[in-house]
Image: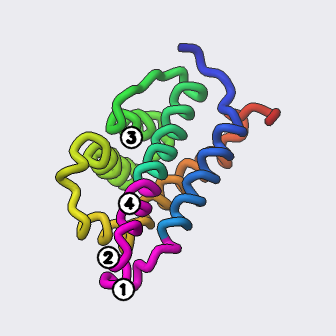
Amino acid sequence: MTPKPISKRVVADRLETINFLLEEIRSLPLGARDAFFTDRRNIWAAESCLRRSLEAVFDLGRHILAKGFGLGVSEYKEIAIRLHDQGVLSGRETRVLEVLAGYRNRLVHFYHEVSQDELYDICANKLSDVEMISGALKSWLKAHPEKLDSSL
């Protein structure tokens, strides 16, 4: 693949999606475990929003690699590694993104193994990991405007 400009539209769309979905999770009653589990719809809303926000993070990472560097990557953990190789993510951020990749795969392929308590804990205490990665991608893009297309 040949590197091409990274689409501002794709970047803006994915970042907006991530922020929206994380806010949707935060609108759930995460401050009180009992309140969260009182309405079973909270579990399904949390799972869907978390899974979709992770998908958006990986879609953005894949887009940066494909367009900005001409690298085709299909495996989620490989996205983390290649972003690090290209200097987009730090070592710490890469390790966090690899963990998120594993969790995304569990949500999709081993959903029956993800307990409701684990899902609650992640939504109540770990959303900052998703924000850290989306923030790191956004910061890298701001620092490299030459990689972005000039049109929307």
Nearer mark to the viewer, of 3 and 2:
2
Task: Give SS at disc 2.
Answer: helix
Q: Which mark is residue 32?
A: 1
Q: Position of residue 91 (x, y in %)?
A: 36, 50
In three-dimensional space, the C-alpha distance between marks 4 and 3, rounded to whole angstroms, equals 27 Å
Residue range (magenta): 26-50
Task: Give SS at disc 4.
Answer: helix
Q: Which mark is residue 44?
A: 4
Amino acid identity at mark 1: Ala
The quadrant holding residue 110 is: top left
Residue 30, above or below 15 = below
* Residue under the point 47% across and 54% down: 133
Label 3, residues with CA under 10 Å away: few <14, some 14-19, many ≥20: many
Question: In terms of sequence position, does the residue under pointer 4 or pointer 2 come before the other?
Answer: 2
Question: In terms of sequence position, does the residue under pointer 1 or pointer 2 come before the other?
Answer: 1
Amino acid identity at mark 2: Phe
Residue that carries the numbered disc 3 in the rendered image: 80
Amino acid identity at mark 3: Ala
Label 2, residues with CA under 10 Å away: few <14, some 14-19, many ≥20: some
Question: In terms of sequence position, does the residue under pointer 3 or pointer 1 come before the other?
Answer: 1
Residue that carries the numbered disc 2 in the rendered image: 37
Nearer mark to the viewer, of 3 and 1:
1
Question: In terms of sequence position, does the residue under pointer 3 or pointer 2 come before the other?
Answer: 2
Nearer mark to the viewer, of 1 and 4:
4
Nearer mark to the viewer, of 4 and 3:
4
Kindly indicate whether the residue at mark 2 contacts the one at mark 3 (C-beta within 8 angstroms): no
- Residue furthest out toward the top: 1
Question: In terms of sequence position, does the residue under pointer 1 or pointer 4 come before the other?
Answer: 1
Queried whether the magenta region covers residue 31, the answer comes back as: yes
Q: Position of residue 118 (x, y in %)?
A: 24, 66
In three-dimensional space, the C-alpha distance between marks 3 and 2, rounded to whole angstroms, equals 33 Å
